[in-house]
Image (cartoon, grey):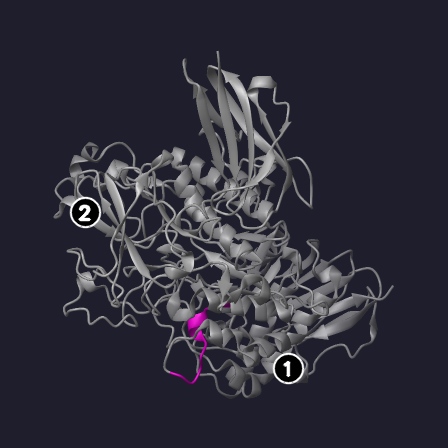
Amino acid sequence: MTTRVRFTYYTGLDRPLWFNPRLTGSWNGWVPEAMTVTTAADGCPSFEATIDLPAGEHRWGVFVDSQARNNIWAVMDEAGLDTTERHRTFTIGDGETDRHETYFFTHLRRLGAYKDASGNIRFAVWAPHAKAVDVVFADASGYVHDDGRGIDAAQAPIALTPRAGGVWESDALAPFAMFAGRPYMFRITRDDGSTRFRTDLYSRHQIGRGHIDPAHTDKPYDGNVASLDGTKGASVVVDPDLIDGMPSADFWRDELSHDRPLPRHVEDLVIYELHIGSLGFGEHRPGTLADAAAPPFLTYLQDLGVNAIELLPMMEFAGDRQWGYATSHFHALESSAGGRDGLKRLVRACHQRGIAVLLDVVYNHYHHDAERAQWQYDSTRHEDNSYYWFEGRGDDYPAFNAAVTPDQRGMGGYLDNVSTGFAPRYHDENVRKLLIDSAVAMVEEFHIDGLRVDQTSSIRGYNKLHADGARVEAANEWGAKFLRQLSRTVKLVKPSAILIAEDHEQGEKEAALTTNADQNGLGFDAAWFSGFYHNLVGDAAGRSEARLIKLAGFGDDRPLPFHSFAGAMNWSGQKKVVYGESHDEAGNGEQTARTMIVAVGGAPLTGDTRRFAEARCRFAFAMAILSAGTPMLLAGDEIGATKLMKHDDPLGSKEDLLGQRAGDGAKLFACYSDLVKLRLRRSGLRSRTIRIVRTDNENRLIAFIRGDDEFLVIGTLSNQPRTHQLDVPGDWQELFNTDSALYGGDNIGNEGRILRAADGVMVPANGAIVLRRVT
């Protein structure tokens, strides 16, 4: 006896990315069989095949072809803890006559409020422990209280029906347009019979632009959504096929410029790290995406020469007072910054000018106050807290049972990972997809060019039991599997997408980060290299690296550990993103400040003190942009920013970028701009090849060769200009000098003359020169 098995592969993407799908499985030695391409109920392409199979265990998967390559294995999830194989497994019992096996590449058009193939709306949510789920609609206040106040009495609730895999779904309802803009929540009857109102974690928009949580305020919520915390407010029905009211295809029609192509490789980037909230100078409000997309600012970026911006996280967080590293809803854009259409407008405007857009994303933890979002979504039992990793059962941790509220008892089984919240449940396919689907939406729907993934080391290496700090290796292994799945999925959707990790693991784990996922690596293109910063600048407390700028800022002539910095410079070629400043080190960390302040030990920036500060900043940027890594600068470095950049004070960190570019920061801006353009115009300066030829701690100097022995860079933090023996074969000529009078320097250099190995080369104080081989 055999069983009729229907296989369906759901892409969940509204455009066809792949063709020639083939089903393959263990029943016939993995011989591929053609599948039929159909349109699924979600309106997206799907692949189907039906075959007869005997009882027993079977494994299966799907091959597809794309415009880029053929024979792509299209199952992204690894099959278990002890294997990297990717297949689906099912067992046919005796007497079964029919069976339907499914695989969802994404849930983007399956969960949330989505439009089906007929243009009607459906609601769906993953709530595997719920006893009942329905959709309720909020009134104009945008908030539903725990006792049900705020529900729109004019709109009847919609009961959802349980489906396979813990999903609750409605039937097709009215045309999607009739629900567009309506605020809604899921009313969940949890496993203990309690009822809670929960947001849609696939929500594309959250009501609320402020930071007020009506459940925890000393005065009644006044219904003003401008003050409401969007992480607590209702979700909103949004049509993903419209942007600013027009079809998405029309919106993106003039996105790209043939005259200004986008950079497609990580080594070709010069990245400008930007906190949107720090823009909008002259107005007492946090900056917005509209400020970033405004022509004056984009022209400013073009004049600087950078070809990529990296935005701090933009997914929904608590109002306009944060950086965004506490994400609650991974598919909704922070409305106080301009929301989803605001981000799309910025991406289009940047692309029209040849500027790529990278986005920071946070997958190592949720918002630390995730009540109404992930926390106990459908269960009061800690072990069934669907979105969080939990070891054992809640009553396994008696030391935690005396907490003041029932919801806090038995919390010892959660995992800490050096984040501000407990670790996600990476072993659950639906949790992984929630996060990865967000990444897919960013590159596919928003046309984002790449992602910088926050604290990947927390995901794959730092997971420890909350009860006693014991390492939980299974969580680390599943974290690594999640990162592999993330990189595979994003690269399959958009092969040109650039993936950058913030990671602090070393040794074999460090090498695995940028190894291809198909070779059991994690598949990232590059990793942030904080060690470069700590050696180059090093103002963070408790560090033991070279800290060149920090020590030079004392103002004396002590030897500096350039030999240690040489190690960081050498390592920059190992697929690293290097920088002399980032958001973490610009005032948020202990004893940290902007480099202009560090460079002179905190002395007032007047007269010669400012000249020393700018010279040392020119040196620092030259070391980063002339290294073998991908260079990044923090917004404001180029004009000598001095204000602390605090994570909770966007107003306090505002700098008048455009005004200072025309004023006191003009010469520093000119130097940064010329260094950027020098790197981008010379392929040898973008290569991963670097060779240190000299370090001199007494004279505070480093010299290194870039490219195929094409460029010689000499940098120094000596307080006096000096002539040094060249000692490098060949004839050389000065190509660039940070001490040019155009940049505020003293014009001390080598006047364009040909230099030979036996000659002396003049190196200015606190500066860098670039020599080009002429023979």
Q: Residues within 10 Å of mark 1 (few under 14, many from 20)?
A: many
For marks 1 and 2, give the one nearer the viewer.
2
* Frontmost residue, 267 versus 755: 267
The region drawn magenta spans 273-283
* Frontmost residue, 362 versus 121: 121
**Mark number, residue 97:** none
Report the residue at 55% width, 33% height from top.
48
Which amino acid type is marked by label 2? Thr
Horizontal and vertical percent position of residue 184: 30, 57
Which amino acid type is marked by label 1? Tyr
SS category of the residue bearing label 1: helix
Residue 599 position (above or below residue 60): below
Q: Which is nearer the N-term, disc 1 or disc 2?
A: 2
**Mark number, residue 743:** 1
Q: Residues within 10 Å of mark 2 (few under 14, many from 20)?
A: some
State whether residue 751 appears in this view: yes
Report the residue at 43% width, 76% height from top.
602
Question: Quick check: 749 left or right of 590?
Answer: right
* Frontmost residue, 408 versus 713: 408
Residue 515 position (above or below residue 598): above
What residue is shown with label 2?
A: 195
View extreme (top): residue: 1
The quadrant holding residue 665 is bottom right
Horizontal and vertical percent position of residue 312: 46, 63
* Frontmost residue, 600 versus 359: 359
Residue 741 colored magenta? no
- Real-space Cα separation, disc 1 to disc 2, in angstroms: 65 Å
The quadrant holding residue 251 is bottom right
Q: Do the numbered discs 1 and 2 sit on residues whose CB atoms are within 8 Å?
A: no
The quadrant holding residue 395 is top left
Horizontal and vertical percent position of residue 113: 38, 52
